[in-house]
Amino acid sequence: MSTDTAPGPDTVLDGDGDGALRSRLLADVTALRESFDAGTTRDIDARLAQLAALRRGLRSEEPRLARALAADLGKSRTESALTEIGVVTREIDHTMRHLRSWLRPSPLPPGLLLAPAAGELRREPLGTTLIIAPWNYPVNLTLAPLVAAIAGGNTALVKPSEVVPATSAALTHLLRTHLDPAWVRVVEGAVPETTILLQQRFDLIFYTGNAAVGRIVARAAAEHLTPTVLELGGKSPVFVDDGVDLAATARRIAWGKFTNAGQTCISPDHLMATARTAEELVPHLRRAVHALYGKDPRRSPDYGRLVSATHFDRVLGLIDDDKVVLGGTAGADRATGFIPPTIMTGVERDDAVMGQEVFGPVLPILVVDGPDEAIARIRAGEKPLTAYVFSNRRAIRERFAHETSSGSLALGLTLAHVGIPRMPFGGVGESGMGAYHGEAGLAAFTHAKPVIRKPLRPDTLRMIYPPYRGLRKALLRLLLR
Ligand code: NAD
């Protein structure tokens, strides 16, 4: 666990130092823009070669990355392989396999009105892009967007999160050692560095993190009319319907909630069920947590830690021990960032834990009358990144799909769907805008450009030029009916 957010390693904030920092960052942006302008990143084989280099780098630097993730977040090597390095490797493989076909221009016939003519849709690179990453899955959420940036034929400046200093250093080493600086450069640092970067003109800013900073990014981007992809968070709800297999449901929810100690953007934030189902579910959840992390999760090598003292204090403040049925504040340890898997029942809408994204190992359970109330509650709040529904009834599942809006909807599972490159991953409304992974990532990092060609002869366009009289007028009226 790190202590509070520290300035980046090279940060000098005063006097000439500030100027030196600015010059260094501008030099990186300029170099990337020049190499984009020189056409370095256009060639598809060259893109594939950079992706292959990233894949090799991931493999050879895996021990260093895993050690860093363990130091910053207490992640086990297996969890790092599964949720960080493995996800990026699959993303690279999927992208390399399909890139040529995704980039093949697709025919876009202009139709009778312009005949004879031919059209197609091409995906062109955007230019020099900026990727700002968060701390919770720092390898995955820094490199998966980078895969899309490279695939799209862009240059990229990457800013890992300063909240995980060991992982930021390991990522920097990986990218500087294995990738071409004409394509990718890294800037380590915090607010001062990011603020300077955000003043520069980029062709896309891809930001992952909280919505308050998301607004800062969007405001800065507006200055240059730079498009943004904002991957934000929010309170992803779970509804458990009466009559489902509670043992299996509890295992899926417990795993989704307590992976990475709940510090997952799509972690099940809170659970809604009828009084009977909520009561019956609790012992199953307890058993599921014990099966995952043993009777003493502090000793489990697979249970993570809170990333910093600030986050520890915030999450601990959300726990109301009077409502706790598992875990609670008693076993927490600030020195190591340990908060036990905690479940609270009888939670009300105005409890502290419902006032913000939990983003920690605390599962509040709210009693609702049934699906109607659960749907109404989701609709009353901000649009979540993901909604989870466990129900045997098809009609109920469909109602959630039709009547609620969220970045994604997962029926009968938690978390696992984001590891699949075919599924676009992104939010809606307060949970973000834009999406990536697989082809969606390529779409985010390219411009879909229609290219149309019409021979000069026969000059059929003369038919629509003024003056509009006689036969021409009658014909046009006929065509436009
Ligand atoms: P964070 O603190 O690492 O911040 C994210 C990035 O923003 C960092 O690189 C940081 O340096 C930069 N930053 C911070 N303050 C800034 C400022 N004032 N100006 C410019 N840049 C600044 O991460 P976080 O925000 O604590 O991440 C957690 C949040 O992110 C949660 O809300 C979570 O749900 C969300 N999240 C979303 C996704 C997703 O894919 N949608 C993934 C992970 C996390």
Image (cartoon, rainbow, N blue to C red):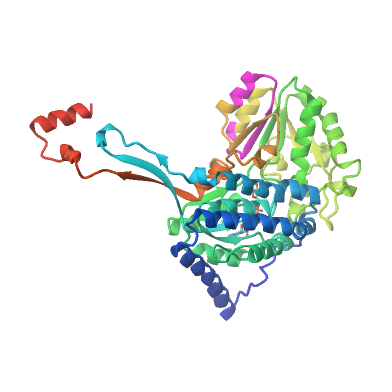
Residue at point 48%, 60% (across, down): 202
Say which quadrant the C terminus sits in: top left
Q: Is residue 369 shown left or right of residue 39?
A: right
**Residue 157 point in image, percent of width and height:** 56, 62
| Image quarter in which the N terminus is found | bottom right
Q: Which residues are magenta?
A: 379-400
Horizontal relation, residue 45 to residue 237: left or right: left
Residue at the outermost left position: 470
Q: Is residue 366 left or right of residue 323?
A: left
Residue 21, how many percent across, how many down?
Answer: 58, 74
Q: Is residue 467 magenta?
A: no
| Quadrant of residue 459 within the rendered picture | top left
Name the residue: 84% across, 34% down.
288
- Relative vertical location of residue 244 with respect to residue 69 in this rendering, above or below: above
Q: Position of residue 391 (x, y in %)?
A: 69, 23
Q: Decide if residue 429 is on the left or right side of residue 334.
A: left
